[in-house]
C-alpha cells in the first residue's frame, strides 16, 4: 500500500462514486479506477460494491477506511510541519461557546489579527459537547469550552475561572419565588440545546433544590435567552460577565450562588496528537496572555510533534515516489 492509493480510496469512499471522486481529485475517472484496482489487487479483497448508483464499501473497505483517513491526516500534518515557518501563516479553525464568543473572544481576535495578519481564522460556535466532538474529529483545531475536560485524547489549557449567576426577570428579588412558580407549574428554564455545559449545571443546581421535571425552552442565541428571561418567560444560568450589562440596564436580575456552584473553569482544548503550527501556537499564547492562562506546555508539544511529523514525512515521501513509478505506466496508458 502507498499513500497515493489510500488517498484515492478515501476520496471514492467519501464521494460515493468514481466520477465524483475524480472531480474532487482533479483527475480523470480512468486514473481513479486504476488506482482502486491496484489497491484491491495488492490486498486481495474487493473494497467496493459497484452498482448503478455508484459504489459502497465492502466490509474490508469499511475496516480500511479509518486507517486511510488517519494516514491522510498524518500526511497533511507532515506537510504542515515541514513547511511551518516562524512567521505564522495559513488558516486555523477555532471553536467557542456562544458566551465566550460574545465577551471573551473579541479582544483575543483583535490582538491576534494585529500581530499575525497573515493568518485567516474561522470561528465556529456550539455547545461544549459539540465543540469537544469537533476537536476530537479534527474539524476544529482548538476550542474554548467550560471545564473540567478530562479526555485521554485532549489537552486542556486552563485560561480563567468564570463566575456563574442565576438570571431571572428583574422583578424576581429572591429565589423563594421560584419554588412558588414550580408549585404552580410555571417554572421554565431558558437554555441552549442539549450538550450545553451551563444547561447541565442549571438542571443539576435546581435538582439539588428539589426542583425537577421543569419545562425547557431551547434557544440558539445568547441574546434570545437574555431577552426571554428578562420578559419573565423563564430563568437561566450564565457567566456573570455575559449578563453584567443587561443587569445594569435593569433588564434582568442576577442571583449569586455558593462558590462551589458558581465557579467553573474555561479551558482551551486541542488534540494531544496533532502538530501545533506556529499560527495555532501563537493563538493559544494570545488567549493565555489575554485571559491569564499558561501556554508553555503547548509550545513544547508543538516541537515534539514537529519532529514526529518530519520523520513521517520522510517515510511517506519514499512511499509516494515508489507508488508514482508503479502507477505511472498504467495511468498513462489508460488516459491515452
Image (cartoon, grey):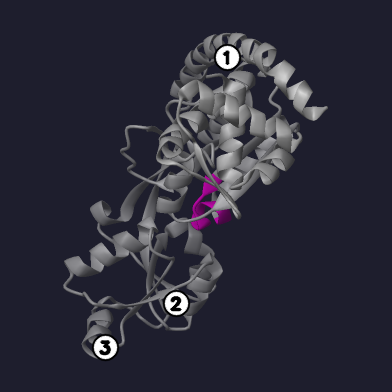
The number of discs equals 3
- Disc nearest the viewer among 3 and 1: 1
What residue sits right under mark 3 in the picture? 185
Element type at marker 2? helix
| 131, above or below 30, in the image | below
Mark 1, other Cα within 10 Å: few <14 / some 14–19 / many ≥20:
some
Q: Look at the image and say whether residue 311 sits in the magenta stretch.
A: no
Q: Quadrant of residue 207 in the image?
A: bottom left
Q: Which mark is residue 316?
A: 1
Mark 3, other Cα within 10 Å: few <14 / some 14–19 / many ≥20:
few
Q: Earlier in the sequence, mark 3 or mark 1?
A: 3
Give the CA separation, mark 2 to mark 1. Answer: 56 Å
Q: Quadrant of residue 276 in the image?
A: top right
- Disc nearest the viewer among 2 and 1: 1
Q: Which mark is residue 246?
A: none
Give the CA separation, mark 3 to mark 1. Answer: 64 Å
| 270, above or below 248, in the image | above
Q: Which mark is residue 229?
A: 2
Residues 110 and 64: in front is 64
| 187, above or below 23, in the image | below
Element type at marker 3? loop
Q: Main secondary structure of the magenta part?
A: helix
Residue 124 at what x, y percent from top left? 58, 50
Element type at marker 1? helix
Q: Which residues are magenta?
A: 95-102
13 left or right, relative to 195 = right
| 204, above or below 105, in the image | below
Q: What quarter of the picture does the C terminus occupy?
A: top right
Q: Earlier in the sequence, mark 2 or mark 1?
A: 2
Residues 138 and 192: in front is 138
Residue 76 showing in the rendered view: no
Residue 226 showing in the rendered view: yes
Amino acid at each position: 500500500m502507498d499513500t497515493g492509493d489510500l488517498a484515492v480510496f478515501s476520496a471514492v469512499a467519501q464521494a460515493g462514486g468514481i466520477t465524483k471522486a475524480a472531480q474532487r481529485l482533479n483527475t480523470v475517472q480512468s486514473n481513479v479506477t486504476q488506482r482502486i484496482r491496484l489497491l484491491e489487487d495488492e490486498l486481495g479483497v474487493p473494497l467496493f460494491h459497484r452498482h448503478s448508483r455508484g459504489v459502497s464499501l465492502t466490509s474490508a473497505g469499511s475496516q480500511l477506511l479509518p486507517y486511510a483517513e488517519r494516514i491522510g491526516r498524518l500526511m497533511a500534518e507532515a506537510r504542515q510541519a515541514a513547511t511551518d515557518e516562524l512567521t505564522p501563516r495559513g488558516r486555523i479553525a477555532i471553536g467557542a461557546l456562544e458566551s465566550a464568543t460574545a465577551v471573551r473572544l473579541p479582544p483575543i481576535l483583535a490582538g491576534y489579527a494585529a500581530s499575525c495578519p497573515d493568518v485567516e481564522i474561522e470561528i465556529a460556535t456550539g455547545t461544549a459537547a459539540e465543540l469537544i466532538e469537533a476537536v476530537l474529529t479534527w474539524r476544529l483545531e482548538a476550542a474554548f469550552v467550560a471545564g473540567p475536560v478530562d479526555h485521554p485524547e485532549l489537552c486542556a489549557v486552563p485560561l480563567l475561572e468564570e463566575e456563574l449567576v442565576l438570571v431571572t426577570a428583574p422583578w424576581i428579588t429572591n429565589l423563594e419565588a421560584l419554588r412558588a412558580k414550580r408549585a404552580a407549574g410555571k417554572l421554565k428554564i431558558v437554555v441552549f440545546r442539549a450538550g450545553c455545559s451551563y444547561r447541565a449545571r442549571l438542571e443539576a443546581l435546581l435538582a439539588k433544590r428539589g426542583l425537577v421535571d421543569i419545562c425547557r425552552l431551547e434557544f440558539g442565541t445568547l441574546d434570545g435567552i437574555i431577552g426571554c428571561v428578562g420578559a419573565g418567560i423563564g430563568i437561566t444560568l450564565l457567566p456573570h460577565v455575559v449578563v453584567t450589562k443587561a443587569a445594569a440596564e435593569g433588564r434582568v436580575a442576577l442571583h449569586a450562588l455558593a462558590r462551589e456552584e458558581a465557579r467553573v473553569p474555561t479551558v482551551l482544548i486541542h488534540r494531544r496528537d496533532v502538530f501545533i503550527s506556529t499560527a495555532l501556537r501563537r493563538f493559544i499564547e494570545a488567549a493565555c496572555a489575554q485571559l491569564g492562562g499558561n501556554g508553555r506546555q503547548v509550545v513544547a508539544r508543538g516541537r515534539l510533534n514537529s519532529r514526529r511529523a518530519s520523520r513521517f514525512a520522510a517515510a511517506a515521501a519514499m512511499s509516494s515516489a515508489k507508488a508514482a513509478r508503479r502507477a505511472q505506466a498504467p495511468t498513462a496508458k489508460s488516459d491515452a
